[in-house]
Each structure stands twice: as structure tokens, then as C-alpha cells.
Image: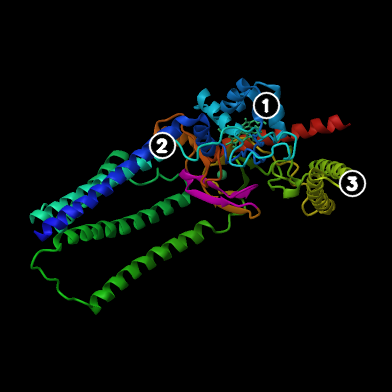
Amino acid sequence: MHSNIAFSKKMNIQTGKNLTRIMLLCALILTTFVNGWAADAAKGKDLFEQNCTSCHAINEKLIGPALAGVQDRRQEAWLLKWVKNSTAMIKDGDPTAVKLFDENNKVAMTSFENFSDEDVKDILAYIATGGDKPAAAPAETAGGNNVVTTGGAVPEEGGASWMIVVIMLGIFILVVQVFNILKLVSEYTGTKFFNPNKSNAILMLVFLILGMTGAIWEFAVHGPLTLPEAASEHGKFIDKMFNITLYMTGGVFVITQIALFAFAYLYRHKEGRKAIFYAHNNKLEVYWTVIPAIALTILVLNGFSMWTKITSKAPEDAQQIEVFAYQFGWKVRYPGADNVLGKSNFNLISGTNNLGVAIRSEYEKVRAEAKETLDELTKEHEFLSKNDDPTEEEAIAIADNNKKLDRAQGHYSRLLALENNERIFDGTGDDDFLPTEIHIPVDEPVLFHFRARDVIHSAYMPYFRVQMNCVPGMPTQFWFKPTKTTAQIRSEKNDQNFDYYLFCAKICGAAHFNMKMKVIVESKADYQKWLRAQNNKVANKKAEQEVAIK
Ligand SMILES: [Cu+2]
């Protein structure tokens, strides 16, 4: 009797709770739909955040220009074309596109060819709302291009992600409720529907078997867990070490996983079974400390000796090549006829000297430009400082001028300091050349010097088992000997289109995936031929320039 009352009471509370939960769920689903339909701007916001914010903000210039008011300065048809493929427009010589490209230091915008017109329009609708910044008092904000159009507020959430959360929540509630009902019914009737200890134990076995068959299936279908055969000398050692490590740790992994899940099954709780009290065993303790310690020591020492070997000093006669990483691409530099890479300095980086190589003529050009900028800013500064009582807007302009002037002075004085630096202007950079592909000779040592301009990148050539970070302000290097020419590996793979590549292995920004450069391994004779041709090109160009000057 007693339990009967308690049960119906419980049931009532339960039903009440259920109703609220169901109502809550419906409300959630409804708002999600309404949000999804509400405005294209919501969809545009998602698209914008997923694809554009790495380079753009609405009210601020990042890598690309601030996008506020872009509909006022460009036609919609132009914008649709631009977002889908700006590179093609620049190539075709669209004057607006070319001008924009030049104004933004010739940084290429990613193309979004898979976008539909609707997608781009949604993004434009979002941009028109002015983004997250409140669009209050637009007339007062710093003028110029920063027109902030007031639009409908963007619903906070919308789209598919919320839908998924709601569905997951629904399923969760459903499962919990089913269990609650079963529990109540079993409490009431005294019958047991299931034994959680046993079902958990069986689930452990199921998990083990599914996991193992999954792993075996994966290897059977997608091949073994190894890289293609190494095409460099040290690569073969690395692979050997990798395999030893894999077999050792893999073996231990399989044994321990089987033990883990099988024990959970074998020693599950059973009525009347009592665990043995077993607190300590010194012998066992020693075994499982000493054996792994020895194994790990062998692995670490092995790795350490390998590391010292492959990072040892490059042979004197190694071919020197500089690899320069930037967002988003690579530049390579060869030392030219003198076989010495010219020095470089970041102050010398310019549109015509991307790597900042110390070349006199380039230096003079950069210095003249820096002087011009400095003079302009100084003039502006003099004009602005006549203003005793600046408005808020003028004060912003003055602060902006001060900042720019400060930078320009710094740059100019650093350039002046380089003027008589014969150590960097030693002439070795004059004959350096920058090809668009990397060529290296087979079976000869090659020494790569890595630099980066903006953020950290990582130079990765998987077939040679080469990977080295490229860090701004910290040159790194790596030398190795390739052992297979491109022709050789092509015939081995039976694929005439195969090529080695240099990739970036650090997620360095939006167009990271685009950072690759072809690497061609040639016989020594072919390589020398290529090198001579390149050096001749440099010499011819120099001769032409000298004639032009005279
Ligand atoms: Cu990168």
C-alpha cells in the first residue's frame, strides 16, 4: 500500500517534469527554425566567420580591407565575381580589381569558387548589418569609407549547429526517461528488466571486438600505417626507428587493451562473489618499472643518436638553398655563380626584393622610398601641429600621423645605419636567383636555410623525411641527401605525373593549404645544366641593365 502511494506520487511529479521538458524542447526547435528563416544575414554571418574573418573584419583593416560599406563602393555583380574568383579578375585586368590588389600589397585573396550567388549575397547582407559592433551614431564615427549602414539586428544564433544540439538533447532526454520508466516499473513490480553489471560487462567486450575489427579493417582497406618509401639517406634510418617504436608500443598497446576490457568482463560484479584483498607485490612492482624503463631508454638513446646524426654540420660542398616562407607561399633562393648566398636584412624587404637580400641598388631604392614617406609624413605633421584646438576627429588624425611618423623614422634610421655595412653588402647577393621550383641533385648533400616573414611555418618534404620550422627572426636549417630522382620515382610508381613537393606543415592561416612548391630531383649532370642556364640568365640580365644605364 505504502509503496503504491509513493509510486503514484512519483509518477505525478515525473509526468509534470516531462511536460515541461517536452514544451521546452518544442520551444527550442521552433526558435531554431525561426532563426534559420529569419534573415539571410544569419547564414551570411556563419559563412563570413568560417571563411573570411582570417583576413577581413567589417570595421577594421586586417589582411584585406575593412568591408563596411563595400556595397556602396562596388556593384553587386562585381562583388559576386570577385569573391568567387578574384585572381581571375586580376589576371583579366579588371581595373578595379588590379587597383585593389596593388593597394593591398598584392596579397591574393582566396577564391571561393564553390560559393553560390546566394551564399555571397547572404554574406553581403551580413556585412550590411555592420557586424557585431553596434551601429549607433554612424554620423559621428570617423568618416571616409567607414559607412555603417543600419540594418536589422542579426539573430544571435541560427543554422544547423543549433539544430544538432537540440536533437542531441532530445535523444539524451529520451534515453534518460526510458531508463527512469524502467526503473520505476521494476521498483514497483519487483521484476528485474536487466542487470547493469552484466550488460556493462558485455558492452566492454563488444567495444573491444568492434574496436579491434575496426582497426584491422582500417589497415586492410587503407594499407599499413607507414609513409611511402623514403627518398633520402637519413629517411631510411628514421623509418627504421619509427618502425621499432611502432612495433614495441603497438604490441604493448594491443596486450594491455585486451587485458583491460577482458578483465572488466571476467571480473564483473556477481552475486556472492567477493574480491580478494591484494594490496602490494614488490616483485611485480619492480618488473613493471624496470622493463619499461629499459625499453624507453633504448628508444630515447636511439632517437638521440639519430637526431645528432641528421642535424650534424653539413658537408662543406653541400648545395646551399634558401627557403623563405610567407603567408601564403614559398620563395627559394639559389646562391648563383659564386655559390654563396647573399646576406639579408628585414629592413630591405620591398615589393621588388621580397627576401630583403642585401643588394646595393635595391637598398638605394628602398632608402629613397623610405625618405619620401618620411618627408610626406613630416610635412603632414607640421601642418597638423598648427592646430591648437583639434576636434575629436582631428585628434584621431594627429595620433595616426604620430604613429606612422614614428615608424617611418625608425625604418629610415635603421636603413641609414646599414649604409656602410660592408659585411652585409659584400656583393654575394648580386647574382642570387629565385626560381619558381626547387631543383636538387641526387646523391649530393643539400643544405636548406629556412626563414619566415610573418608567422611560424613549417617546411615539410614527406618523401625526404624533412620537416623544419620556419620561424620569423630565427633562421633554421636542415641538410640531407636525396636518393631518388623524380624520373626514378615516377617509373617506380608507374605515374608520369608524380612530383615531390614542399608543403607547409603549420596551420598558418586561411590559405595555408595553398603553400606548396614543386621539388625536382635530377641527376648531377642535369642539375648542373639547369644551374648553368639559370646563372646565365642572371648574367645576361645584369649585362642588359648595365647597357641600359650607359
Ligand atoms: Cu604556412
Q: Is residue 131 above or below residue 447?
A: above
**Tag 1 secondary structure:** helix
Question: Mark 3 is on which residue type?
Answer: Asn
Question: Mark 1 is on which residue type?
Answer: Asp
The stretch in magenta equals: 448-472
Tell me the residue at 24%/52% (across/down): 13
Q: Residues within 10 Å of mark 2 (few under 14, many from 20)?
A: many
- Which mark is drawn over residue 72? 1
**Tag 3 secondary structure:** loop
- Which mark is drawn over residue 387? 3
Could you tell which of marks 3 and 1 lies nearer the N-terminus? 1
The residue carrying mark 2 is 32
- Magenta stretch: helix, strand or loop mostly: strand
In percent of width and height, residue 350 lies at: 74, 41
Q: Do tag 2 and tag 3 residues touch (Cβ < 8 Å)?
A: no
Q: Nearer the viewer, mark 2 or mark 3?
A: 2
Question: Mark 2 is on which residue type?
Answer: Thr
Q: Is residue 91 magenta?
A: no
Quick check: can you spot residue 2? yes
Q: Quadrant of the C terminus?
A: top right
Cα–Cα gap, marks 2 and 1: 32 Å
Q: Is residue 461 magenta?
A: yes
